[in-house]
Amino acid sequence: MKNDSKLIQAFLKQKQQQSLYRKPRISESAQQPLMQMDGGKYLSFCSNDYLGLANHPDLVNAFKQAADKYGVGSGSAHLISGHSIEHQKLEEALAEFTGRDRVLLFSTGYMANLGTVNALLERGDYLFADRLNHASLVDAGLLSKAKMKRYPHGDVAALERFYKNLPNLLNINDDKDSFVNSMILTDGVFSMDGDEAPLRELVKVAKQNQAWLMVDDAHGFGVLGKTGAGQLEQDSLSQEEVPVLMATLGKAAGTAGAFVAGSDDLIEYLIQTARTFIYTTAMPPSIAAATRASLKVIAEESWRRDKLKVLINQFKQGAAQLGIELMPSNTAIQPILLGSTERASKLSKALSDQGILISAIRPPTVPEGEARLRVTFSANHTEEQVDQLLNTLEKSFK
Ligand SMILES: *Cc1c(COP(=O)(O)O)cnc(C)c1O
């Protein structure tokens, strides 16, 4: 964009005409199903607070107590003087919870992905990424000097073909000891689709090719698995099988930040090399304390995962009865595919006029022609609220 206000205004006008204009709503209540927003009351189905923990009293208390003791700001990066005992305890608790040797905290998931991918890949390496990966994983690949190849969504055969062709690309003969450094990078639960990556098969391909396998479990952590430890717990995948696990704390865990879990060596290596860990301020200690309280609630209040499943099934059955087509997802992310950006924006607006908040997800967040309403559920929703959603959808679809 040139430094010319006329051009910027023309750009903004065009975005509005294309129904692609983005604008934040102003929330005046805690994150919960009933939201006070932009001066109105809404029943929200678009938060990632899947377990309803963002406003849980145990987390709020832990946060307040830590703030009383440690103040608000962490003051500096982890490697200077910002690594508090609360960060340390959270890393240890997360390692135990995920069954990994060690954990490293990052201030956001975006930064965890940029930092980790770039620490592990350099010029001449290969990155194989699912086409529908989250924007932060795409950006991590673009920032790296590795060659990024994107395989069609969930298409393990296409991924294997990339690997078969690799020796030709590289002109390597059959010297068994030399292998090209590569990484397979995928969302666990896909953020805009709600479906799950074929992790077991990806593990196989990674093993055959001595590749790193990195899984972003932003939408599985807290929700999937018997104790809520995420998709790797659900699929019984060990640290050896998935050496790099990343998950965020701002979604089901209800707080903020992210972590990478793996071997002792991997974490030590990231501490030395991950620039988004080294050159940024540590998250406030009170966030770490609240997150540790969250882990306890996640493990102890398993009814939240059960309740979420009940609500998801209720919605899927209800939508099927109404003839509303959903995408193939069993998770708390239940998108309604609409196609045109205009249609998605109109329906989102019609719903909000009736007090229901669901945001339209438009390109470039999703591919062109695949605009959708991304419906998400929280354990704090009631069955009556899901009925209300279905009734309003029925009216609005007509
Ligand atoms: C939300 C999200 C992120 C980014 O995490 P933040 O902590 O919000 O920066 C990364 N990956 C996926 C799949 C996500 O959904």
Image (cartoon, grey):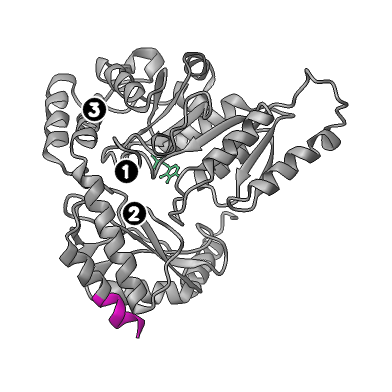
Mark 2: which secondary structure? Answer: loop
Q: Residue at x 41, y 18 (%)?
A: 102
Mark closer to the chain start, 3 or 2: 3
Is 328 located above or below residue 113 in the figure? below
- State which region is magenta: 391-398
Residue 69 position within the rendered picture, expressed as x and y whole percent measured from the top left: 14, 19
Instruction: Decide which of tag 1 and tag 3 comes sooner along the chain.
Output: 1
Give the amino acid type for the residue marked by disc 2 in the picture.
Ala
Q: Residue at x 53, y 59 (%)?
A: 364
Residue 109 can be seen in this image: yes
Q: Which residue is mark 3?
A: 292
Q: Quadrant of residue 73?
A: top left
Marks 3 and 2, how far apart at CA: 23 Å
Q: Nearer the viewer, residue 62 or 317?
A: 317
Question: Residue placed at 24% from the left, 77% from the top?
Answer: 391
Label 2 crowd (10 A; few <14 / some 14-19 / many >=20): many
